Image (cartoon, coloured by chain):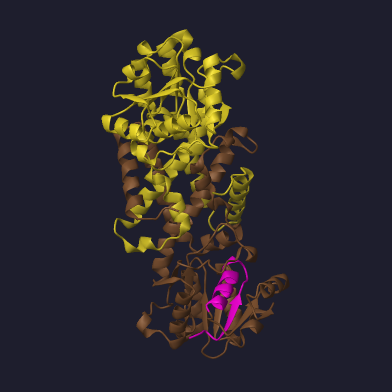
Chain colours: A yellow, B brown
Amino acid sequence: MSLNRVTVIGLGLMGGSLALALRRAGMAAHIAGCGRVALLDRAREMDAIDSGSVDAGEAVTKSDFVFLCTPVETSIKLMAQIAPRLKPGALVTDVGSTKNAFAAAAREIFGAAANQRVLPGHPLAGREVSGLEHASVDLYAGCLWVLTPVDGAREKDFTPGQRELVAALKAIGARVTFSTPEEHDRTLAYTSHLPQMLSTALSLTLEQAFGQGNPALQVHAGGLRTMLRLAESDPAMWEQIADSNQANLAKALERMEAELRKLRESLGSAEFRKKFEQGREFAKFLKIPRE
Amino acid sequence: MSLNRVTVIGLGLMGGSLALALRRAGMAAHIAGCGRVALLDRAREMDAIDSGSVDAGEAVTKSDFVFLCTPVETSIKLMAQIAPRLKPGALVTDVGSTKNAFAAAAREIFGAAANQRVLPGHPLAGREVSGLEHASVDLYAGCLWVLTPVDGAREKDFTPGQRELVAALKAIGARVTFSTPEEHDRTLAYTSHLPQMLSTALSLTLEQAFGQGNPALQVHAGGLRTMLRLAESDPAMWEQIADSNQANLAKALERMEAELRKLRESLGSAEFRKKFEQGREFAKFLKIPRE
């Protein structure tokens, strides 16, 4: 089973890695790419794509599956742009970090057919680097890939194309799971977007307290390196994530601010130790494997 | 050059690793250990120590150098306890994560001689695990080891014993640097204690938002694993760190809370992107190597 003809729109870390992985797994007879000319050239050199176009509408005309691999808001605009050019029955999916806005746009663009024509997705495989030069055929190996059917369809109701997509994602090593767009975005506000904001805000706090070029900051250990790693992530991508999940993220940040304040107010009292132990237990409870 | 006879008080991750490293580097003719009986037995089996005692006073009587490798407040109590039993001219040092309280205790205990008899230290080599079973002969290889002379003495004023200590730390691979107790504690509040509190508070936030056993939390990626790693650290150690650096840490937490609030308030505005980019630049500027 193969997806036959595929278009990957956006040849960055996510799209480039996806094309490479589909190719290696034999999941596509033809991969068309869409991106800037220099990216198309580079993607061809890497044998990630068979043909290329700078125009998204042109890139999708012959394809059975279209992967939108750009930041959330860009993918929404592109979906509207490609919709009239799609082959009948072609399936659209994406790799965006939030799903509510994308699912809503799918409903608007495809109407009653949205649930059949679009199957939004989110592979949890981001890195703090971006760009085709960091693309890796193994990026999705073992990663969780959340599919969020537009109107909450179950797997048993999937179209044949949607089943083929699931099979292809498994073939490239992803662990496929299902959620609703709403639940996905609420959860990710805490498990992905909040951790990112903490790292960024920690960096801002250090700058505010020390200023640039202060040699005192060289006195740090592994903990700081760990906590600042995410701060190097791509601002363009995160602006769109934050914009498209604003209410959930604001709520998560408010809760985090409250927990920090309570921890601060517990300093010097027995409550501090209790809180520290509670945080430790919960972190262990999550059974998160060490990196 | 060797430290001749050494006592290591506290045979956990730090003390155990130190004994192993001094041994391998040939920096001690005799290593006496102090700890609970089971730890002494285990440390002997590992060839980390030559002799052992459960009594700190007894453990130090013949030694030229004493390393206090227990949590900050414990080390302060032990310093008072061993002071009358020390050989004349023996040098006391420690590996505590905060230095103000320890330096103040040294002044109280040793009076005018504190600057000669004690040289407080802090190797930035902590891990989120603890205990002798995690001790490693390489723990201090390449790590920054901050020495904070009690009354701000310069290296040129050091006693011969203090110079020998510096040489021995370099021999086990540490990068020795100097600071004052005050500057050390202010800096570490931001570069070590604040990152720890963030990780703990993030764990508490997740528990508050989801509760235990919520399968939604399995939908997370590497970023969350990274940011929760520190939350698994030892509560007993961190209680003492927080207690002994309360004012600096409270200030750092207040600043962090303010930065988080400002980032939240910037959601949906151009200011968000600006802040995100600023945080990214500063994190890169710190030239912190990737792990």
In percent of width and height, residue A117 lies at 47, 14
Q: How many marks?
A: 0
Q: Depth check: B21 or A271 in front?
A: B21
In percent of width and height, residue B39 lies at 69, 70
Q: Depth check: A26 or B43 in front?
A: A26
> Is B9 a magenta residue?
yes
| Vertical comparison of A102 with B39: above or below | above
Identify which residue is drawn at 50% across, 78% down: B106
The picture quadrant where one finds residue B70 is: bottom right
Q: Can residue A39 be seen from the camera position used here? A: yes
Identify which residue is drawn at 63% across, 71% down: B11
In percent of width and height, residue A179 lies at 56, 25
In percent of width and height, residue A255 lies at 50, 39
| Vertical comparison of A158 with A167: above or below | above
**Outermost left residue:** A37
The picture quadrant where one finds residue A18 is: top left
Q: Can residue A262 be seen from the camera position used here? A: no
> Is B283 a magenta residue?
no
- Which residues fall within the magenta stretch? B1-25
**Outermost bottom residue:** B88
The picture quadrant where one finds residue A200 is: top left
